[in-house]
Amino acid sequence: MAITTTPTAPVERLARTWETAPGLYGILATVDHKKIGKRYIVTALVFFLAGGIEAAFMRTQLIHSNLHLLDAEEYNQIFTMHGVTMLFLFASPILSGFSNYLWPLMIGARDMAFPRVNALSYWTFLLAGIFIYTSFLIGQAPDGGWFAYVPMTERTYSPGLNIDFYALGLIFITISTTVGAVNFVVTFFKMRAPGMSLNRVPIIMWGTLSASVAIIFALPALSAACVMLYFDRRFGMHFFDPAEGGHPLLWQHLFWMFGHPWVYIIVLPAIGLASDMIPTFARRPLAGYTFVALSTITTAILGFGVWVHHMFATGLPMLATTFFSAASMMIAIPSGVSIFAWIATIWHGRPVFRTPFLFLIGFIVLFVIGGVSGVMTAAVPFDWQLTDNYFVVAHLHYVLIGINVFPVFAALYYWLPKMTGRMLSERYGRWVFWLMFIGANLAFFPMHISGMLGMPRRIYTYQSGLGWDTINLITSIGAYVFALGVLLFLLDFFRSLVVGPEAGDNPWDAPTLEWSVSSPPPPYNFAVIPTVRSRHPLWEDRLGEAHHTLLGTGPVLDRGRETFGTSALDSDAYEILQMPEDSIWPVMLAAMMTVTFYGLLFGVWWLAILGLVLVILSLAGWCWPTPLREEELDLLPEEG
Amino acid sequence: MTLVARPYDLPISPQDLRSPGRLGMMLLIATEASFFVYLLFSYFYLASMARGSWPPDGNPALRLSLPNTIILIVSSGTMWWAEAGIKRGQQGRLRLGLLVTLLLGLLFLALQGLEYSHQKFTPATHAYGSLFFTITGFHGAHVAAGLLMNIFVQARAWAGHFTATRHLALSNVALYWHFVDIVWIIVFLSLYISPRLG
């Protein structure tokens, strides 16, 4: 085929090709990674608010001894749903949202590798979240804690539907997470713009890649465990029943084989986001790029070898616990490498203290505190003293708020202007940061002490005179202050949509490709596919790079939805990929799965089978090829 | 400013082994394989914890399972034969190979159903029964999924969708079928053979 040149990029044609159709059809059928990414972020934030309201209930109950706003059963449901919501419906999906939105823009592509799978991933996440939350409507929300230990969660001791919602809901959300992970891995290796070799990708890509690989290998442990739990409960099987040859520790092993990698799955992409934002505010490239990338991968791999540290108090042999104790402490090494890289970047930079940077500093501080209490609980004798009390609650909240929520809020302040075209307020931003930072420390630092004073986690109330009243009062005040910060953020967000100053293409003077396009970006992302020549395409002049990234010059690819397929290491273009059109099948498939899961939940087998048949038909409809358009037929190679 | 509408002589979505779809299928298989790894971990974990004899009702019989293993291995061969056919552009060989593979897969499921009906225990008898039926049942479900994929690509084969150079969907289904076959060999070695070695 001939090489044709055009004088100007046909942006109107590109826009027509890539735009989502208007109306209801477009809403349901869109496969635009930017729309899906934004939906992910908004949905995850709604669940964050739901989990926050649950936390507020708990902190109000515990603000003083002998309060009974909630009874024990209600409290069990609330704390379980708080954990399930924050871990499965907020922490991971919000990062998927950022990765979905940012990846193609950062790597100079026009979409993810599998846009329809991307849509499926979102719809299943949304519907799985709704599925789990409908448990509240019948007053039978999961009540076994987020790790739902057997035998407490077996039918004998938990006869309601509570745990069935849990087991099936988690299997459902697993589908969403897994297909999303596959999409990220393929996108990482196939879709980067020409020239974006492996050593030039932003760190978020390494973070999400490591997390996605971990998801592919770790999540089936959760699915398997939940399938067994459901089978035990629904069909009277005996996986966890010692009377008939089962074993309760089997649940714990499977759960934590998934559960510990999950911790890294929900922090590594956030660490990646932070590693990409810190250079912008330090005004220099990241120190030790290679080390940060490698430590990300190392953490994900080590994360598979530490699950038993959640089970030190179960009476396993000392040799086993010692091994897992050593492995757990080893995690401190790659974490330390990253922390020193960030400190070095800031140290040698000229830091600009804008709101995202404040959150990043808060992230480093909380990460260090959470890391130190992590090393402490990795020591077996120390863990025996503190297991299942508030010290552990303090540790896990420092880790998750420090390494997930703070980078996420930094990222919201940093990238929302790209998504909406409007800046958030710097003045309110500082208030938000200080409220959240002081609130988090006020809420969670005292928990270390209440733990050491012997306060067990998950109690719904406590006696007076145990010395816990003041500490719990401080904790509750901290939680309210934190909540105030989040509310102020929401107010500022809605305010900025109306009166926020225009962001422009690159309001932070940042180095990566997503800042080279307009805010918000056009549907086709790049009118001309960039050819990348360095790690920081927009800082090449000032860094004196010998080669310059080509922006606005080069290939257009405008016959239908097209983008490059490139080689895994060096990112040489070797094919032009035809990307799929919008499709109604992903949302259909997710809806039919929902039907199946409700059928399984209530034991209405005809409904489950009907749902399954419709799932199969939806898959067939999805995979059956659509006839090619004329212009695409022209381009097909001659059959020989 | 130089703009190139269509840059080099690059192929348009060629359906070769470097295609995104191929890598996607390999990752799907990786996560499914992990699922079976965790199921088999559960099997060996509970076996190692068993207080009485394991399996409780004696070793599972080979009378049906061994022939069934051979049937599934042969069906991998016929699937390979079908794929090799379309690589040479032979539509008839593709359709015949897929059809034979489908029949062999159905035969496997039928024999497994027969074996189920002869078992002395049910999934609710003891933990071994739960494991046996869950592991072989999930494998059977994967066989069924492979057969549905087979029917799907067979319909496409009869519609003439595949050519010597463009048959990625078929290659992916074939890969999945080989995976289902390998999982069965591992399940067979774990559940039927390993208790005989103790």
Image: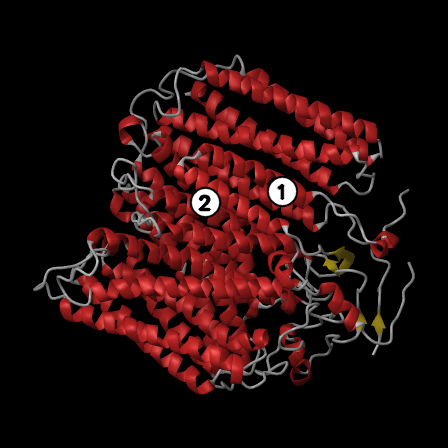
Residue type marked 2: Ile
Judge from the rendering whether residue A539 lies leftward or rightward of residue A400; answer left or right: right
Q: Secondary structure at mark 1?
A: helix
Q: Position of residue B84 (x, y in %)?
A: 78, 32
**Disc 2, SS:** helix
Query: Around disc 2, counting alpha carbons within 10 Å, would you say few (fewer than 14), some (14 to 19), or many (20 or more)?
Result: many
Can you say which quadrant of the picture contains the C terminus of chain A? top right
Position of B52 relative to A322 (above/below): above
Q: Name the residue furthest top.
A: B63
Which one is in front, A149 or A12? A12
The residue beneath circle 2 is A171
Residue bearing the label numbered 1: A619
Image location of residue A432, percent across then percent down: 39, 79
Residue farthest along the left direction in this orientation: A465
Q: Local crowd at mark 1 within 10 Å, few (<14), some, or many (≥20)? A: some
Indicate the quadrant where residue A451 lies. bottom left
| Residue type, label 1 | Leu
x 63%, y 36%: residue: B176
Protein chain holding label 1: A
Of the numbered discs 2 and 1, the one sitting upstream in the chain is: 2
Residue occupying image coordinates x 34% and y 79% = A435
At horizontal 47% and vertical 16% (from top left) the residue drawn is: B117
Q: Is residue A147 above or below residue A551?
A: above
Answer whether residue B69 is visible to the viewer in this image: no
Q: Can see residue A132? A: yes
The chain to which mark 2 is attached is A
Q: Answer with the quarter of the image where residue A418 lies.
A: bottom right
| Disc ID at residue A28 | none
The residue that appears at 79% across and 64% down in the rendered structure is A557
Name the spot of residue A513 as percent of width and height, x first: 65, 73
In the visual, does B24 lie left or right of B130? right
Say which of B23 and A582 sits in front.
A582
